[in-house]
Amino acid sequence: MFCRDSESFALFLFSTDPRLIQTATQSGVGGVVVDWESIGKAERQVGFDTQINHDTVEDLARVRAATRARVLCRLNAFGPTTQAEIEAAIDNGADELLLPMVRSANEVETVLAWVNGRCDLGILIETEAAVERSGELARLPISRVYVGLHDLAIERKTANPFQAIADGTVERLRAAFEVPFGFAGLTLPDRGFPIPCRLLMAEMARLRCDFTFLRRSFHRDTFNLDLRYAIARIRRAMREAFARSTAELEVEHRRLLEAIATADGYFRARCEMNRTDAVQAASQ
């Protein structure tokens, strides 16, 4: 079932701050993500302007105590630590686990067996292997699918993380899954550089996505704003996007493709600058 309207479209916030979480969930955020993924991430994402969190078991317990909203916990990629992380996440109140960097249905089946129905399991598609095996993954009893554009771009050796939208990968994946589906991330509708956020909102509506995350720039863009006002603006913009006709959303889709193509040079230059900075920092 694809998302039918904006009212069922969910926003999730990465945070471990109880006060921020309480305000956000009272303002329309559907849940909170505690992020444990850090193993190997710095090496994998060198040269890319990404965020690496180092949330802890104590952070998860504090978030759980602070809210009745849905709490998601992103684990590290499947490996030697996975089973222990599952137990710790469930023991400390996670409603749903997110498994990143999935590469095979067997990994997900193993995690589902370890979870044993005690909470839900969502997956992140951010490897070529997962894209190729989307049919197998779609048959598993998972709770949601999110396409991680940055890591997928790294695997594909492209600087532009939005290329998976432009080449149709995201749309094909959306068609493969019936569980809640999301991609990219949102901030205020009039922000977002070099891809305007309003174009991503229109694409989420065109593909009838079900959820997304409030991305890192959301915190920066709303630093001096009332959080309730900021979230209301996003939800209003999503309502407007879902209310558009098919023809109107196709026009916005073409504009998005043009913006992605135009942004290629910007992303290549940024990656080169970040790699240079990383090399210089390592040599000091």
Image (tube, rainbow, N blue to C red):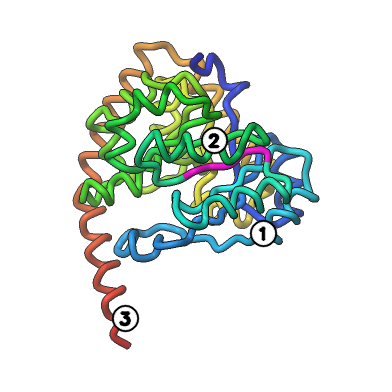
Horizontal side of 95 relative to 213 (left or right) equals right
In the image, residue 72 lies in the stretch drawn in magenta? no
**Mark 2 or 1, nearer chain start:** 1
Horizontal side of 13 relative to 281 (left or right) equals right
* Residue in the image at 69% along x and 37% along y: 70
Q: Few, some or many C-alpha atoms within 10 Å of disc 2 (few <14, some 14-19, many ≥20)?
A: some
Residue on which the image places disc 1: 57
Query: Of the residues tagged 2 and 3, which is closer to the observer?
Result: 2
Give the magenta-colored segment's residue range: 95-99
Query: Of the residues tagged 2 and 1, which is closer to the observer?
Result: 2
Q: Mark 2 and mark 1: span between their CA atoms?
A: 21 Å
**Mark 3 or 1, nearer chain start:** 1
**Mark 2 or 3, nearer chain start:** 2
Q: Amino acid at mark 3?
A: Ala
Residue on which the image places disc 2: 112
107 to 14, vertically: above or below: above
Q: Amino acid at mark 1?
A: Val
Secondary structure state at the residue bearing disc 3? helix
List x then y, in percent, for residue 177. 42, 22
Tell me the tag on residue 282: 3
* Residue in the image at 50% along x and 47% along y: 215
